[in-house]
Image (tube, rainbow, N blue to C red):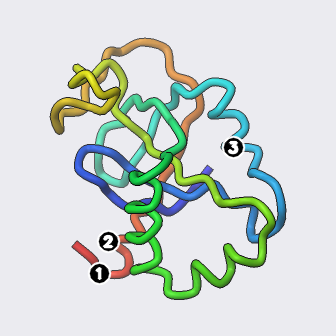
Amino acid sequence: MIVGYIEDGPNLVTLAMNGWDEGAPAWWLNLEANPEATVRLARQQPRPVRARAAAGEERDRLWKRWAEIDAGLDGLAGSRTTPTTVVVLEARNQPRNGTGLAKDHEYLDTGGPSGWIVELLGVSHRLGFA
């Protein structure tokens, strides 16, 4: 699966869209059921991640970052009856800071079994954002 992403500190963030049709895409439903995956970025080693849906203030903040990249995002999303899930991909087996969030910026590869392989297309890099 190839999806666009933005970086948020050590995390990668994507949107779970089924085009602009109703319902969640199959890849997100699969990640909800089994959130462990492996991300492959160009010219980098595969990294094991755990997927989760952003919520509350975090979702709002990340949605605004996406809207800065895609000016039509709010209009297209408004045509749907359900909100678009903002998916956060966090490094697996990374120490936590007590809030459920990753403690530092290192990605750790445990060499263990991986779930879904998600290939990400760097929207921020493709469009020239740092």
Determine whether label 2 and label 3 are within 8 Å by CB: no
Task: Classify 56 as above or below 73.
Answer: above
In the rendered view, would you say 20 is above or below 84?
below
C-alpha span from label 2 to label 1: 5 Å
Among the two numbered marks 1 and 3 on one chain, the one whose residue lies closer to the N terminus: 3
Tag 3 secondary structure: helix
Quick check: marks 2 and 1 in contact, CB under 8 Å? yes
**Residue 108 picture location, percent across and down:** 25, 25
User: Which quarter of the figure has residue 100?
Assistant: top left
Displayed quadrant of residue 6: bottom left
Q: Amino acid at mark 3?
A: Trp
Name which residue lies at 50% across and 56% down.
14
Q: Position of residue 69 (x, y in %)?
A: 42, 79
Q: Nearer the viewer, residue 41 or 97?
A: 97
Determine the residue positioned at 37% across, 75% down: 126
The residue carrying mark 2 is 125
- The residue that appears at 34% across and 31% down in the rendered structure is 91
Question: In the image, 104: left or right of 57?
Answer: left
| Disc 1 secondary structure class | loop
Q: Which residue is mark 1?
A: 128
Q: CA distance from mark 2 to mark 3?
A: 23 Å
Residue 17 in the image, given as x and y percentages of width and height: 68, 60
